[in-house]
Image (cartoon, rainbow, N blue to C red):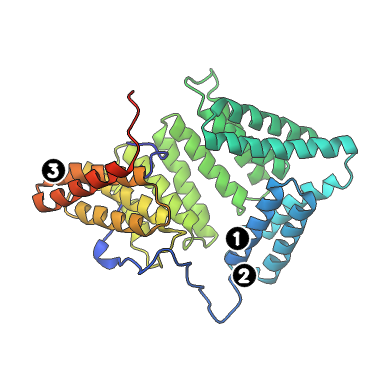
Amino acid sequence: MQSRSRLLAWLAVVTLCCFAIRPSLAQPPAAPRPAALPSLLDAQLSLTAKYKQALDSLDFAGQQAALREMRQVTAANAAEPKFYSLAELDFMLHDLSRRDAFTAEQQEVARQQQSNRGLGMHFAGQGNLAMTIESRRTALEAAQQLYGDQAHATLDAQLLFALSLSESETEPQPDGYPSVQLAQAVLVRLENLRLTDSLQYREALRAVMFIHINHRNYPDAAKLGESYLAACERAQLTATTNYLDGLADVANVLNRDQRYAEARDVARKGLNRNFELTRQNGPSYLNLMHDYAYACIGLQDYAKVPQAYDTMLQIADQLPRFPPPRKLELLTEYQWLLKRTGDQRRLAEIERQIAELQTQLPPREPK
């Protein structure tokens, strides 16, 4: 099975006859309540963007302002589905309020802590694992020094460090993998703090799942993925991209474990839903469809797989800035399938597209 880093290594499709591509994926999703104010989910997403911008610029006042505004909006719409609970927002604000009493030296450590968190993200994007681990280790140590072991900033830093550490672990220690222990400890602390309805708890479940994937422990990864889905369902987040991604994660893990029938059922759960396809959820839907297709191939049930690839290519063409190398991967996979199923007419068209796309890509360096 391909890794998630290779475009669509998480395959899938549904009863495709029920699915129609929207005229333009470049358009934003329609507001669920056109005559009313944006939903709480939309408001939280917008304020999260403001919070992350302040986080990236080490603007503590901006972070606090964004979270306070989010808390106010959330309190006024408490019955609606939400990413962040009121309790979680209070948990996050508590760290920021403590900074008001910091000495000048502690303020500098706090800035360095967030700076190293950002550096970890930067190095992770570059694929520099050694520097990612070092930056995140430093961020975790600073958070522990400033806030203790049970603060939001510390648990956030611990999860990120555990994720990157797991990529470097080849053999477990006598008492297991350190990354698993670190990430599991975050889950336990959030459970003890009664924050199991928080975004951070859901992220921790997904992080432990990815850590198990890195260790090729697919049975435990699938269990964590199912726990993540259950947490999303409890929070009424089944209409979000997060939930689609979670379904793709679980289907992918089941495919890796050669549990193809289960993977197909999980993928269908998302693909049979009636929702508008947008540029925001289009990549998630494509991944889920790819997982479905992979499961069908594993079961040697090819009937709907060509239609799945046609739809995936249609989505890819409508998504802005869809990477050409990734489209080439899809076309190459489809070529293999058509050779197997014997559809010579469609095979000729796909091979024509492959040849055309290859002329637009730089030549591969010899290995």
Which callout, 3 or 1, points at the residue further toward the start of the chain?
Answer: 1
Q: Amino acid at mark 1?
A: Leu
Q: Residues at badges 1 and 2 in contact (C-beta under 8 Å)?
A: no
Which callout, 2 or 3, points at the residue further toward the start of the chain?
Answer: 2
Classed neighbour count for the residue bearing mark 2: other residues with Cα under 10 Å, few (<14), some (14–19), many (≥20): few
Q: Secondary structure at mark 1?
A: helix
In this image, 192 relative to 30: left or right? right
> Could you give the CA–CA distance between mark 2 and mark 3, rounded to whole angstroms?
53 Å
Question: Label 3 belongs to which residue?
Answer: 339
Q: Amino acid at mark 2?
A: Ala
Question: Label 1 belongs to which residue?
Answer: 45
Q: Secondary structure at mark 3?
A: helix
Residue shown at the point (37%, 64%) measured from the top left: 273
Q: Residues at badges 2 and 3 in contact (C-beta under 8 Å)?
A: no
Q: Is residue 63 visible?
A: yes
Task: Locate residue 187: give its quadrant.
Answer: top right
